[in-house]
């Protein structure tokens, strides 16, 4: 490791580390029990059926990532990152407090919307201050992001353990309340820490200089945006009127949201490709970003089933008793965070080791590996499910191994995906394209929710085929990427 990488990090990094750790405590803790709560009709849950519950899960988790777009915009243009994080954290905490009140589904949905809005404001901006701390970029910034990623996963493990336990063993709303306390601790850390160690970072942005030219350009862009929005409204109305989707149900709403996300992303990419004034090299790089977008959305659509279909499988079909004690099923979701904490340093050293020998796989190959590992994990689930259909509880080793595959896959794809977006995006579209990276996660979460709607108690014998479908999709796309990695790599135009 070079001296610059091991050199001491600014204290501000640790303020952000702990603030994000507590935010993720609340996010992953609450998410771990969300679907269980939504479909529970015995212990004071909401009692939705599997299709509706899974659609709400998908809509909620997708909104969290989608709202990072306005959240990033608010910070860039109005609030500055620090204020956005502070207000975002307060809104998240209020959201969890609302969820902690056992007052029916209306109040509960209000709580979910509140948490999603707050997270949109906090999540993208806390990462951008991490970047800001290292204006020189390079290996030290990468090292900082790895440390920060550890904070995310430490928070997730603590959150799932505590919120999952309280929610499943004591009372759902007690779990949601614990998430609120986690966020409160994050706010305290941020308030005191940022005053001392983050002054000068993420401050209120300077007013943008508006020229006649920039005004005319943004006016023209706005017009195109309105046209697209109008076309979308008409398209959705047609889908509704022809009975293709029914937006009076959660499932229909989630499908509608999927249509909007896919169309807007598609048009956005077409817009910058054909009307973005890009050079030939930049255009090729945007093509690479499109390939990575599709791969990432596909990856997250399998990976984020951690909180949906895999959670249902843990609850209904996995052997969890140790002596007389039964482990809360949500704790299985801990394997992801725990494996990250264990293997992130190993993987980072592996990439360094390989690159000193000129063997470091290229970014498209890493994406392909991520998808192949994801698929591998789902083949393991197919095996598990074919045992479960006979009515027996299966060994916890299946889910554990699946999470191991998925986590190594995440470590191949997620960090390089994020940094490739920062490197390949044409400068003037950087923040928007960073937003698009989160949109891929949003789409993935939505699909992960919608897909889990198939996991109904009356539908148990379908499970092996369902897991097999996901496995084939991800392995198929992974292989495709592996076959065509050369042209994709060439389009990157020398960027590693
Ligand atoms: N686990 C990571 C986080 O919470 C990445 C999640 C994602 O991008 N889908 O930040």
Image (cartoon, rainbow, N blue to C red):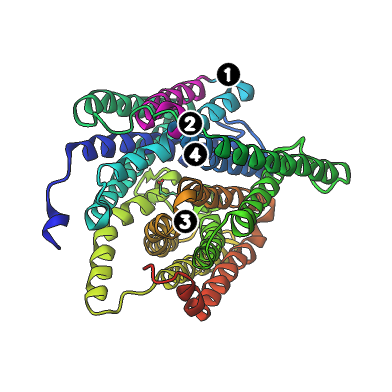
Viewer-nearest residue: 63 or 230: 230
Tag 1: Cα neighbours inside 10 Å, few (<14), some, or many (≥20)?
few
Q: How far apart are marks 1 and 3 (CA)?
A: 48 Å
Q: How far apart are marks 1 and 2 (CA)?
A: 32 Å
Tag on residue 323? none
**Would residue 284 be seen by someone viewing this image from the given angle?**
yes
Kindly identify which residue carries mark 3. 426
- Cβ of mark 1 under 8 Å from ligand 1: the answer is no
Mark before the other along the chain sequence, 4 or 3: 4
Viewer-nearest residue: 198 or 279: 279
Tag on residue 103? 1
Viewer-nearest residue: 433 or 33: 433
Classify residue 170 as left or right of residue 139: right
Q: Where is residue 263 in the image (x, y as percent from the top left)?
A: 68, 51
Residue 85 is covered by the magenta coloring: yes
Which of discs 4 and 2 lies nearer the camera? The answer is: 2
Q: Give the range drawn in magenta.
A: 76-101
Mark before the other along the chain sequence, 4 or 2: 4
Which of discs 3 and 2 lies nearer the camera? The answer is: 3
Tag on residue 68? 4
Which of discs 1 and 3 lies nearer the camera? The answer is: 3
Q: Distance between the residues labelled 4 and 3?
A: 20 Å
Kindly identify which residue carries mark 2. 74
Q: What element carries label 1?
A: loop
Mark before the other along the chain sequence, 1 or 2: 2
Which of discs 4 and 3 lies nearer the camera? The answer is: 3
Residue name at image x 55 percent, y 30 percent: 112
Residue name at image x 26 percent, y 47 percent: 135
* Depicted 6 relative to depicted 109: above or below: below
Mark before the other along the chain sequence, 3 or 2: 2
Q: Quadrant of residue 419?
A: bottom left
**Would residue 164 be seen by someone viewing this image from the given angle?**
no
């Amino acid at each position: 490791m070079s001296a610059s990488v091991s050199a001491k990090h600014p204290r501000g990094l640790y303020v952000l580390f702990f603030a994000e750790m507590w935010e993720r405590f609340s996010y992953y803790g609450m998410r771990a029990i969300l679907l269980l709560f939504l479909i529970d009709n015995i212990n004071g849950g909401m009692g939705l059926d599997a299709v509706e519950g899974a659609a709400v899960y998908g809509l909620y988790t997708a909104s969290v990532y989608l709202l990072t777009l306005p959240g990033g915009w608010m910070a860039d243009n109005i609030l500055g990152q620090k204020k956005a994080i502070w207000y975002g954290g307060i809104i998240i905490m209020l959201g969890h407090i609302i969820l902690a009140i056992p007052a029916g589904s209306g109040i509960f949905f209000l709580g979910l919307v509140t948490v999603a809005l707050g997270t949109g404001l906090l999540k993208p901006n806390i990462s951008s201050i991490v970047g800001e701390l290292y204006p020189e970029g390079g290996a030290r910034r990468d090292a900082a992001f790895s440390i920060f990623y550890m904070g995310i996963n430490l928070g997730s493990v603590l959150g799932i353990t505590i919120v999952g336990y309280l929610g499943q063993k004591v009372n759902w709303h007690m779990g949601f309340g614990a998430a609120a306390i986690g966020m409160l601790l994050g706010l305290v850390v941020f308030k005191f820490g940022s005053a001392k160690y983050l002054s000068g970072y993420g401050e209120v942005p300077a007013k943008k200089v508006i020229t006649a030219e920039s005004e005319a350009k943004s006016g023209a862009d706005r017009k195109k945006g309105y046209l697209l929005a109008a076309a979308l409204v008409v398209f959705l109305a047609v889908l509704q009127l022809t009975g293709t989707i029914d937006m009076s149900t959660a499932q229909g709403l989630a499908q509608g949201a999927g249509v909007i996300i896919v169309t807007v992303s598609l048009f956005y990419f077409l817009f910058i490709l054909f009307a973005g004034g890009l050079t030939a090299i930049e255009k090729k790089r945007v093509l690479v970003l499109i390939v990575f977008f599709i791969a990432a959305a596909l990856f997250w659509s399998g990976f984020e089933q951690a909180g949906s279909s895999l959670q249902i499988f843990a609850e209904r079909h996995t052997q969890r008793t140790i002596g007389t004690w039964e482990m809360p099923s949500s704790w299985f979701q801990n394997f992801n965070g725990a494996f990250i904490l264990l293997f992130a340093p190993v993987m980072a050293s592996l990439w360094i080791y390989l690159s000193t020998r000129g063997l470091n796989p290229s970014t498209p190959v890493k994406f392909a590996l991520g998808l192949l590992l994801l698929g591998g994990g789902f083949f393991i689930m197919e095996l598990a499910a074919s045992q479960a259909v006979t009515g027996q509880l299966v060994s916890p080793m299946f889910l554990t191994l699946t999470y191991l595959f998925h986590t190594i896959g995440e470590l191949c794809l997620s960090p390089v995906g994020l940094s490739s977006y920062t490197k390949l995006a044409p400068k003037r579209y950087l923040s928007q394209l960073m937003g698009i990276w989160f949109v891929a996660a949003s789409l993935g979460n939505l699909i992960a929710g919608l897909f889990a709607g198939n996991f109904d108690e009356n539908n148990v014998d379908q499970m092996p085929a369902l897991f097999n479908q996901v496995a084939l999709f991800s392995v198929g796309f992974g292989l495709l990427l592996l076959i065509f990695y050369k042209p994709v790599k060439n389009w990157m135009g020398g960027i590693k």
